Amino acid sequence: MKDAVRLLIYLAASVLLAAMIAPPLFWAAQALATHDLFRFLADFDFETFFHRALLIALLALVWPLVRSIRLRTWRDLALEPNPRWLRDVLAGFLLAALPLLCCGLLLLVLGVFSLRSSIDWLDFLQLAGASIAVPVIEETFFRGLVLGVLLKSGRRYMSIILSAALFAIVHFLKAPERTSPVVTWLSGFGSIAHSFHQFAKPMLVSAAFTTLFLLGVILADARVRTRSLWLAIGLHGGWIFARGLFQALARREVVALPWLGKNLLVGIVPLALAGLTWILMRGWSKHVDPAKS
């Protein structure tokens, strides 16, 4: 329990540190762009820099957290070396991506979505990078560190639920774009306040939160069952890739709430597909590693 409290203090301190360092990070980027160095930085608004500042803060404070809970090796977080890591990554990717892409194809046939007339091929390069970087970073943090610390309590199912809830909540810490036209030293704290704007639409929040929570549970279950992060990384990457690919190729023609939200990961249908992936993942893991199931 003490380790869980330290974890919460670490998260709160990271958010506060991000709020303080986001303004100078933004000003430094604008200064570089003004002097014709990395001019593309001028295209990003303050909220983007707040998200990057949060990542920097999480990384900066992770060492004091590790020291405080006396972690020596990955085994202290209930993780083991996985010699079949590539198999697990590929399996997770396919188990997550294929159901979503099949659903997307069906939505195109039904006319709910239509193919875009033009495609920005740069989006595919960004999608490839995101499908690799985001799962590695988020799984290392949420399923590696956070879930590992919670599992030290010995309460497996409660740890999975708490880590999934935290995973969903953190994804709501996102203010609308262009909410800080004038950046001051207090703009970071303004971003934190603005991030709660979504709760003005409880139906949309509940739909998105439910999906994110279930995805968090599935990823945590994959990590606990395999005692490694690779299957979870593959699942996470598959979801990001399938959603991004469909979003790049198709546009919505019909509003289908509550069955389908703004993308392939929000709504009742995506929730059912996530459940299908969960069933397939558990069946696959029992088949290939019965000793760990």
Image (spheres, rainbow, N blue to C red):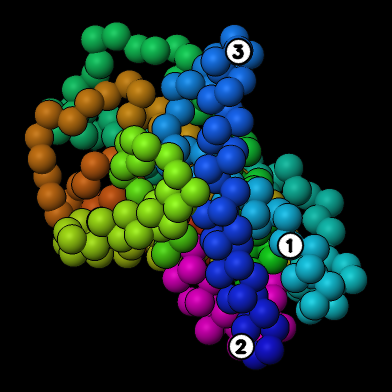
Is 163 inside the magenta-drawn segment? yes
Disc 1 marks a residue whose amino acid type is: Val
* Residue 139 in sight here: no
Q: Which mark is residue 62?
A: 1
Q: Could you tell which of marks 3 and 2 lies nearer the N-terminus?
A: 3
Q: Quadrant of residue 76?
A: bottom right
Q: Considering the numbered disc 2 on the image, is that residue within a helix, a strand or a loop?
A: loop
Q: Residues within 10 Å of mark 3 (few under 14, many from 20)?
A: few
- Read off the residue under disc 3: 35
| Residue 195 drawn above or below residue 251 | below
Q: Closest to the observer: 108 or 220?
A: 220
Residue 111, position in %: x, y?
12, 28
Q: Closest to the observer: 65 or 169?
A: 65
- Read off the residue under disc 2: 155
How many dots with numbers? 3
Residue 148, position in %: x, y?
69, 72
| Residue 76 drawn above or below residue 179 | below
How far separated are the C-alphas under marks 3 and 1?
A: 34 Å
Q: Could you tell which of marks 1 and 2 lies nearer the N-terminus?
A: 1
How far separated are the C-alphas under marks 3 and 2?
A: 54 Å
Residue drawn at x 12%, y 44% as measured from the top left: 256
Disc 2 marks a residue whose amino acid type is: Arg
Q: Considering the numbered disc 3 on the image, is that residue within a helix, a strand or a loop?
A: loop
In the displayed structure, does residue 218 sit left or right of residue 14? left
Q: Considering the numbered disc 1 on the image, is that residue within a helix, a strand or a loop?
A: helix
Q: Could you tell which of marks 3 and 1 lies nearer the N-terminus?
A: 3
Residue drawn at x 88%, y 68% as measured from the top left: 73
Q: Which residues are magenta?
A: 148-167
The prevailing secondary structure element of the residues shown in magenta is: helix
Of marks 3 and 2, the one in the foreground: 3
In the displayed structure, does residue 156 sit left or right of residue 216? right
